[in-house]
């Protein structure tokens, strides 16, 4: 039987440390605060919002919600982002993506103050992830994969890793972060030839395709570690990952469940970024 790499212990360990740090900040008159910017009422956004709010509460972070209608104008969205940028009591902003209007989304991403960009919306944060240098925060989910691997003591140096997915939210950033930790990474996508055999050759497989049941027994082998980032709803209406868990789990050595795997760590990473952003404000003030 494979070892289950559950997210809860990872998230709890991160949160315990954050609570101590937020208490310290509050003691120094800085109350860490996250702005959540949501356009519309998509069920997956609402579900992530509930998780993020619970996690922030445990970590000692206040949350202010900004909710706009699905058909909001560019002016409404930019006014809201300006409000967030100009409010010194807000240290980080999470905007749910994708927005219904992709062009509006791009403009919104460019407007956010990079110092408050806790989920890698701006080009400054992306540049940090890709260059390995700078103050930008990585996307929370990509960072959550790294936290999970570290918590379970999975060494990356010299390991062969296959990542399924090349989006800017997960596939590309996680590939860069794995490579920065000296893994040898193959980034796969819909045009990858022989996907199953590329994945089977890897020692670690990160699945971030958004396709329920994509990763079957053909994709894996003994001793492999499987990180399932996918969040999908299967034909029976149940939440599932990209990995066919029942088929794959008996073969590999370790695997993340869905739900209760990477997803549970993502909100803890979001909280961690907010605390770090607030600590930076404190240090700037202290040295002024
Ligand atoms: P996305 O933007 O749709 O990107 C999916 C990527 O997977 C694309 O690069 C696509 O390749 C590739 N892909 C799709 N089907 C494939 C297939 N059959 N074979 C090989 N490659 C395939 O999705 P995303 O935003 O990166 O999200 C990926 C998954 O992660 C989704 O299930 C999402 O719900 C989940 N997610 C989880 C969390 C969490 O906290 N756990 C957070 C955010 C998202 P092409 O580039 O060739 O199209």
Image: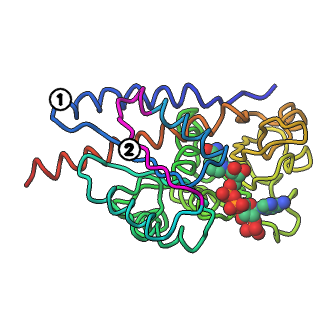
Residue 169 in view here: yes
Q: Horizontal and vertical percent for residue 53?
A: 48, 34
Outermost residue toward the left in this view: 288
Q: Which mark is residue 158?
A: none
Q: Is residue 225 left or right of residue 147?
A: right
Q: Is residue 210 left or right of residue 57?
A: right
As measured in the structure, the alpha-carbon distance from the residue carrying label 2 to the one carrying label 1 is 18 Å
| Quarter of the image that includes the N terminus | top right
Q: Horizontal and vertical percent for residue 66?
A: 44, 49
Asked which secondary structure carries label 1, the reply is helix
For the record, the magenta segment spans 56-70
Residue at mark 2: 34
| Quarter of the image that includes the C terminus | bottom left
Q: Earlier in the sequence, mark 2 or mark 1?
A: 1
| Ligand 1 lies in quarter | bottom right
Q: Is residue 35 left or right of residue 254?
A: left
Q: Residue at x 86, y 51 (%)?
A: 214
Magenta highlight on residue 3: no
Is 21 drawn above or below residue 172 in the view shown?
A: above
Q: Are marks 2 and 1 in contact (CB under 8 Å)?
A: no
Asked which secondary structure carries label 2, the reply is strand
Q: Horizontal and vertical percent for residue 9?
A: 55, 25
Badge 2 density bin: few <14, some 14–19, many ≥20, Cα 10 Å = many
Is 110 drawn above or below residue 37 in the view shown?
A: below
Residue at mark 1: 27
Badge 1 density bin: few <14, some 14–19, many ≥20, Cα 10 Å = few
Q: Quadrant of residue 29?
A: top left
Residue 161 in view here: no
Q: Horizontal and vertical percent for residue 211?
A: 81, 52
Magenta highlight on residue 64: yes
């Amino acid at each position: 039987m494979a070892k289950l790499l559950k997210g809860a212990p990872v998230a709890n360990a991160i949160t315990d440390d954050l609570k101590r740090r937020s208490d310290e900040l509050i003691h120094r008159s800085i109350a860490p605060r996250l702005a959540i910017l949501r356009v519309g009422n998509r069920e997956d956004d609402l579900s992530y919002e509930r998780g993020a709010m619970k996690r922030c509460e445990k970590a000692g972070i206040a949350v202010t919600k900004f909710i706009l209608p699905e058909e909001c104008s560019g002016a409404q969205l930019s006014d809201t982002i300006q409000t967030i940028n100009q409010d010194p009591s807000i240290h980080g902003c999470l905007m749910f993506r994708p927005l219904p209007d992709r062009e509006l989304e791009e403009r919104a991403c460019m407007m956010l103050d990079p110092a408050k960009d806790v989920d890698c919306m701006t080009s400054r944060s992306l540049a940090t992830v890709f260059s390995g240098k700078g103050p930008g925060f990585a996307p929370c989910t990509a960072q959550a994969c790294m936290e999970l691997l570290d918590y379970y003591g999975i060494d990356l140096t010299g390991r062969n890793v296959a990542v399924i997915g090349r989006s800017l939210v997960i596939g590309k950033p996680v590939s860069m972060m794995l490579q920065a930790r000296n893994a040898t990474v193959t980034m796969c996508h819909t045009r990858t030839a022989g996907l199953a055999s590329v994945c089977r050759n890897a020692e670690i497989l990160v699945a971030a395709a958004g396709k329920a049941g994509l990763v079957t027994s053909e994709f894996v082998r003994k001793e492999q570690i499987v990180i399932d980032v996918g969040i999908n709803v299967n034909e029976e209406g149940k939440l599932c990952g990209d990995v066919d868990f029942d088929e794959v789990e008996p073969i590999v050595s370790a695997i993340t469940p869905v739900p209760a795997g990477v997803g549970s760590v993502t909100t803890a990473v979001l909280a961690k970024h907010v605390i770090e952003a607030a600590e930076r404000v404190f240090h700037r003030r202290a040295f002024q």
